[in-house]
Image (spheres, helix red, strand yellow):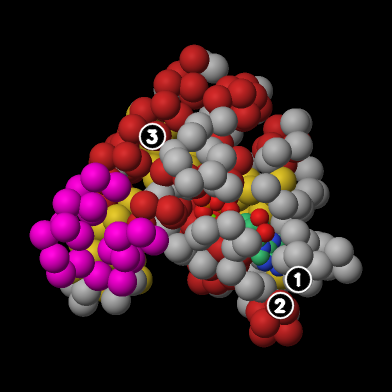
Amino acid sequence: MPKLQAVVKLGGSVITDKRGDRPRIRRKALARLAEELASAPRGRVVGVVHGAGSFGHGPVLRSGIQKGVRTPAQRLAWAEIQVLQNELNVVVCRALIAAGLPAVPHQASASAVMDARRLAHLDDTALRELGARHMIPVLYGVPAADRAQGCSILSGDVLAPALARILGADLLVLGTDVDGVFTADPRLDPDAKPLCRITPQTWPQVADSLGPATSKDVTGGMRGKVSALLIHAQNGLHARIIDITRPGHLAQALRGANVGTLIAPE
Ligand SMILES: Nc1ncnc2c1ncn2[C@@H]1O[C@H](COP(=O)(O)OP(=O)(O)OP(=O)(O)O)[C@@H](O)[C@H]1O
Ligand SMILES: [Mg+2]
């Protein structure tokens, strides 16, 4: 019987308004999600990751730093974008603390190194020690040093399964604004059908239907999410992509309910 310890990603599409051009937090949604996390049995939620939403994707696209950094103006944009993520992270941590969760900010780019846009190194020493003390580290998508191109974006979708592995969680819940993975983008195609389960074996048949996100997303939208999860599925991780704009849905997933799309080893 699995112990059911979970890492949860709060999608930037839900905790911020991603359609607008300016960084804007959805405080009501964030407070509700914090309550749902806190309603899980004590000890179930061991780590949290959040996306950047309107704090990240727009500013990154405008500066182009996801493709590398060469000019002084781009270095300034990198610094500015990092600080913006830290500001969002403080608001998220405060919401979690207000709900009674011992949430601590954790800036992955302080110890992570990318190589050609892939995560090459993430120091896990402090994360393991925090986990052993029942603290809940809260990581977030950030610009990070990249050996090949100066800088690239370390996505929350990549950090979430990595954190689940480091903390020994057996469930990862990726909360976003659609109820899982569909045969096509459900915002564009009314005939899109939900997929209950994706495995490394079934992935090649569905991969082509998964386009990038409708709204601005520099880290690959739904396709980026599933690709990152499948790497870890091969090591036994079970992950669910669910709609957390629906009240109560996150709490259900944390109780082990069969909601959204399951990405599983087989
Ligand atoms: N096949 C698909 N099934 C489901 N959603 C899809 C599909 N293809 C594209 N999408 C889009 O992916 C979007 C969700 O990904 P997106 O990256 O925007 O959200 P997020 O990860 O919650 O935000 P952030 O990256 O800021 O954390 C949906 O709003 C949907 O429009
Ligand atoms: Mg995204």
Q: Residue 157, can we see it?
A: yes
Q: Nearer the viewer, residue 104 or 256?
A: 104
Residue receiving disc 2: 209
Left or right: 165 with respect to 153? right
Picture residue at 13% right of the left edge, 65% below the top: 71
Q: Which residue is mark 3?
A: 89
Q: Which residue is mark 1?
A: 184
| C-alpha span from label 3 to label 1 | 31 Å
Taking the spot 16% from the left edge, 58% from the top edge, the residue there is: 73
Task: Give the image quarter of residue 75.
Answer: bottom left
Quadrant location of residue 135?
top left
Is label 2's Cβ within 8 Å of ligand 1? yes
Magenta stretch containing residue 68, yes or no? yes
Asked if residue 17 is positioned above or below residue 239 in the image, the reply reads above
Q: State yes or no: Cβ of the residue under disc 1 lies below 8 Å from any atom of ligand 1.
A: yes
Amino acid type at image mark 1: Ala
Instruction: Give, as a three-letter code, the residue at label 2.
Output: Ser
Q: Secondary structure at mark 3?
A: helix
